[in-house]
Image: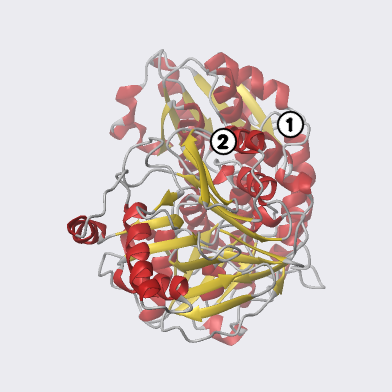
C-alpha cells in the first residue's frame, strides 16, 4: 500500500525524492518521510500528514544530498504518529530504512534486540528490521568485512518471516542504497549517472524509462554509476532492463479537473479504445489476444473457469461470470481471492483460473494465483501494469492499457476489466457455438461504445443535480437484475468508499427477502434498469419502494417505459448490446458517487482508511 522512493546519483536528491513521493501519494498515506545523506550522516524528515507537506519542509531546509530514501506510510503496526512514520533510524544512527509489508515475527526479534540493549522509539515492525540489520552491521564492521552493509542486509532478511519491500542506507557507505523485495513490489530506474528504486515506476516519470523489475527474494545494491542484483544466497542474478512505456507528466497530474477520479471518469472513452485496439479479427466477427499463451484447441478443452479478485476487481469477476456464461456457455465460478487461498475448494481439473487486478500487485490475488499454479491449473490475468508481479507470474494474460489510475476509487480500470472480460466471452463463444452474426453484432457495439460513453458524459450536470439532491442521505440501496446486480454492488461500493454513505447492493428480486425493511423516506433506492427482458419485473420492484415512501433513482435506457414513471429521478443512457450494458451503465454510477462525495466535502481521491494498491493482507 505504501510508497517507496530511493535515489542515488549526481543530482540533488531532495527535489527528486519529494517529486517522486508526491507521485506515489495516490497509493494511500497517513504519514510521509525522507532520509537524506547530507555528508555528515543521515538527516531524517518525517511527520504525519501528506507527502506534499513534509516535502515542503525538506525543500525549505535546503539539504545538500545526492542520495536518499523516502516513504509514504499506511499504518499496519502502530498508530498514526510521527514516531511510527518512516524512515526509521537505528539506535547506532548508521542505518536508515523504509519498508512496505509486514514482518510477522517482529515481536520475537524485538525481544531479542531489547535484551541486547536496543531501545525502540516506535511501535513498528520496521524499526525492528532496521535495528536487526544494524546489529549485524556492527558485528561485520568489527570483523573488518569490506561489504559489511550488504552482508548485514542479507543476514537480517534471512531471519524475518512475512513480506517486505525495503530500501536502506548506511551513513558509513554514502552513495549506496540497498533494496530488497519479498511480496511487495519494487522496481529499479536505471539512469545516466543515477539510479532509483520505487514501489511504482510512476516515481521515475521524466527521469528514465529504463527499468528493472525485482523478483521476490532478490536484493539490489545501487550506486550512481552501477547496480547489482543478488538472490538471498548472495549469488548474482542477471538483470533484464526493460523499456517502460513513456509517460508524460500530465498522465500523473489532474490537468483542469478538480480530482483525479473525475479526470479518469472522463478518460474512459479513450481508455477503452486503447483496451480494444488491435484485438479484433479482420472479419469483425470475434476478438483476439496475443498474450494468452494458450492455443484455441487448449481453450476448447476448458469446461469451467474460475475468476478471482478483490474489491472492485471482484465485481468485474462477477460480471465476467454473467457475460461469459451467456456468450460462451461455459460455467464460471467467482471467488474472493482473500478467501480462496485459505479454503480447500474442490476445483475440477479442466478449470482455467483467471485473476483480475489493476495494479498486478494485490497481495491476496497474487497468493490465490500462486495457489492455483501450485495445484497445476492454467492461469491467466487481466491487469493494467506491465511488469507487475501478477503479470510476471501468470501463465498468460491481457493488459488493459488504460494508463495510470491515480484515484483510489477505480473507474476506468473497472470498465476496462469488464470490457475485456466481455471480449474474452466473445472469443471463447466463437470457439464454441456463438454465431458469426452475433459475434459481428457485439464487435460492432464495442466499436460504438466509446462514443456512447461520451454521450453519457455530456449529461454530467444532470447527474450532478441528482447527486446533490441525495447527498445528505446516510443510507442507500442499489438494485438490479441479472447483469445489473454486480453493477449494483459496484455502485454501492463506489458511494460508500468515497462519500462514506452506507450503501448496499442487492438483486432487485431479493428486496422482499429482507432489504425491503430498510425502505423508508430516509433510505433512497437506486435501480439500474435498462430496457430488456427484465424491465417489467424491475418496474414492479420500483412500485414496491414507492408504495413505502422510499425515494427512487433509476438509471435506464433512452426511450424506456420507466422514463414515463412519475415521482422518480431518471438518468438515461444510450441503448447498446446487453453484454456491454454494464460498461455503459457504470458511468452514471461513477458520476453520481463522485458528485455526492464532493457535495459532502469528502476527499474524493484519498478516502479515509483506504489505499489504492493493497499489497499486504
Q: Quadrant of residue 364?
A: bottom left
Q: Quadrant of the C terminus?
A: bottom left
Contact, mark 1 vs mark 2 (Cβ under 8 Å): no
Q: Nearer the viewer, residue 553 or 214?
A: 214
Q: Quadrant of residue 117?
A: bottom left
Q: Is residue 45 above or below residue 236?
A: above
Would residue 393 be visible to someone looking at this image?
yes
Give the residue drawn at x 26%, y 65%.
Answer: 343
> In the image, residue 230 lies at what x, y percent?
51, 80
Secondary element type, mark 2: helix
Q: Nearer the viewer, residue 298 or 227?
A: 227
Q: Is residue 373 above or below residue 611?
A: below
> In the image, residue 283 lies at what x, y percent?
81, 72
Residue indicated by mark 1: 257
The answer to which of marks 1 and 2 sits earlier in the sequence is: 2
Residue indicated by mark 2: 54
Give the residue drawn at x 32%, y 43%.
Answer: 122
Left or right position of 461 against 603 = right
Q: Nearer the viewer, residue 126 or 567?
A: 126
Secondary element type, mark 1: loop
Left or right position of 398 against 329 = right
> In the image, residue 427 lies at what x, y percent?
64, 71
Give the residue drawn at x 66%, y 43%.
Answer: 584
Report the residue that reaches farthest toward the right: 282
Amino acid at each position: 500500500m505504501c510508497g517507496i522512493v530511493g535515489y542515488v546519483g549526481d543530482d540533488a536528491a531532495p527535489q527528486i525524492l519529494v517529486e517522486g513521493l508526491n507521485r506515489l501519494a495516490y497509493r494511500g498515506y497517513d504519514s510521509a518521510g525522507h532520509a537524506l545523506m547530507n555528508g555528515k550522516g543521515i538527516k531524517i524528515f518525517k511527520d504525519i500528514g501528506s507527502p506534499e507537506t513534509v516535502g515542503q519542509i525538506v525543500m525549505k531546509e535546503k539539504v545538500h544530498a545526492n542520495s536518499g530514501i523516502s516513504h509514504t506510510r499506511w499504518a499496519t503496526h502502530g498508530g498514526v504518529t510521527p514516531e511510527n512514520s518512516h524512515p526509521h533510524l537505528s539506535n547506532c544512527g548508521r542505518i536508515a530504512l523504509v519498508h512496505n509489508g509486514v514482518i510477522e515475527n517482529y515481536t520475537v526479534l524485538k525481544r531479542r534486540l531489547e535484551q541486547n540493549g536496543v531501545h525502540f522509539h516506535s511501535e513498528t515492525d520496521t524499526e525492528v528490521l532496521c535495528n536487526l540489520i544494524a546489529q549485524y552491521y556492527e558485528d561485520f564492521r568489527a570483523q573488518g568485512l569490506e561489504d559489511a552493509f550488504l552482508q548485514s542486509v542479507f543476514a537480517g532478511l534471512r531471519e524475518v518471516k512475512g513480506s517486505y519491500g525495503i530500501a536502506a542506507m548506511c551513513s558509513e557507505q554514502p552513495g549506496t542504497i540497498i533494496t530488497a523485495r519479498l511480496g511487495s513490489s519494487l522496481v529499479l530506474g536505471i539512469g545516466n549517472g543515477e539510479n532509483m528504486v520505487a514501489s511504482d515506476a510512476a516515481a521515475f516519470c521524466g527521469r528514465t524509462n529504463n527499468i528493472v523489475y525485482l523478483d521476490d527474494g532478490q536484493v539490489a545494491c545501487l550506486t550512481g554509476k552501477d547496480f547489482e542484483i543478488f538472490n538471498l544466497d548472495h549469488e548474482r542474478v542477471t538483470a533484464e532492463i526493460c523499456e517502460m512505456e513513456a509517460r508524460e507528466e500530465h498522465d500523473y497530474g489532474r490537468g483542469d479537473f478538480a480530482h483525479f477520479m473525475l479526470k479518469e471518469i472522463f478518460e474512459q472513452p479513450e481508455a477503452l479504445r486503447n483496451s480494444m485496439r488491435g484485438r479484433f479479427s479482420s472479419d469483425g466477427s470475434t476478438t483476439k489476444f496475443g498474450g494468452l499463451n494458450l492455443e484455441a484447441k487448449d481453450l476448447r478443452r476448458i469446461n469451467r473457469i474460475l475468476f478471482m479478485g478483490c474489491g472492485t476487481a471482484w465485481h468485474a469477476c462477477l460480471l465476467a461470470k454473467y457475460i461469459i456464461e451467456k456468450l460462451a456457455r461455459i460455467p464460471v465460478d467467482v471467488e474472493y481471492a482473500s478467501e480462496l487461498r485459505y479454503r480447500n475448494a474442490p476445483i475440477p481439473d479442466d478449470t482455467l483460473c483467471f485473476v483480475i487486478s489493476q495494479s498486478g500487485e494485490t497481495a491476496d490475488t497474487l497468493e490465490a494465483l500462486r495457489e492455483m499454479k501450485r495445484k497445476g491449473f492454467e492461469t491467466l490475468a487481466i491487469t493494467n501494469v506491465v511488469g507487475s508481479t501478477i503479470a510476471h507470474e501468470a501463465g498468460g494474460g491481457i493488459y488493459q492499457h488504460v494508463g495510470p489510475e491515480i484515484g483510489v476509487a477505480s473507474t476506468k480500470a473497472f470498465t476496462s476489466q469488464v470490457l475485456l472480460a466481455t471480449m474474452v466471452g466473445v472469443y471463447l463463444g466463437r470457439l464454441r457455438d456463438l454465431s458469426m452474426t452475433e459475434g459481428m453484432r457485439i464487435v460492432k457495439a464495442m466499436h460504438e461504445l466509446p462514443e456512447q460513453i461520451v454521450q453519457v458524459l455530456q449529461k454530467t450536470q444532470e447527474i450532478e443535480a441528482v447527486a446533490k439532491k441525495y447527498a445528505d442521505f446516510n443510507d442507500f440501496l442499489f438494485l438490479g437484475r441479472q447483469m445489473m446486480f454486480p453493477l449494483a454492488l459496484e455502485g454501492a461500493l463506489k458511494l460508500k468508499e468515497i462519500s462514506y454513505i452506507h450503501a448496499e447492493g442487492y438483486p432487485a428480486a431479493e428486496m422482499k427477502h429482507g432489504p425491503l425493511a430498510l425502505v423508508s423516506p430516509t433510505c433512497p433506492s437506486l435501480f439500474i434498469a435498462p430496457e430488456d427482458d427484465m424491465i417489467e419485473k424491475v418496474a414492479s420492484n420500483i412500485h414496491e419502494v414507492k408504495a413505502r415512501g422510499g425515494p427512487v433513482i433509476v438509471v435506464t435506457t433512452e426511450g424506456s417505459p420507466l422514463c414515463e414513471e412519475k415521482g422518480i429521478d431518471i438518468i438515461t443512457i444510450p441503448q447498446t448490446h446487453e453484454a456491454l450494458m454494464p460498461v455503459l451503465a457504470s458511468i452514471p454510477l461513477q458520476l453520481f458517487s463522485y458528485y455526492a462525495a464532493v457535495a459532502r466535502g469528502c476527499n474524493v481521491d484519498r478516502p479515509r482508511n483506504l489505499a489504492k494498491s493493497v499489497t499486504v493482507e
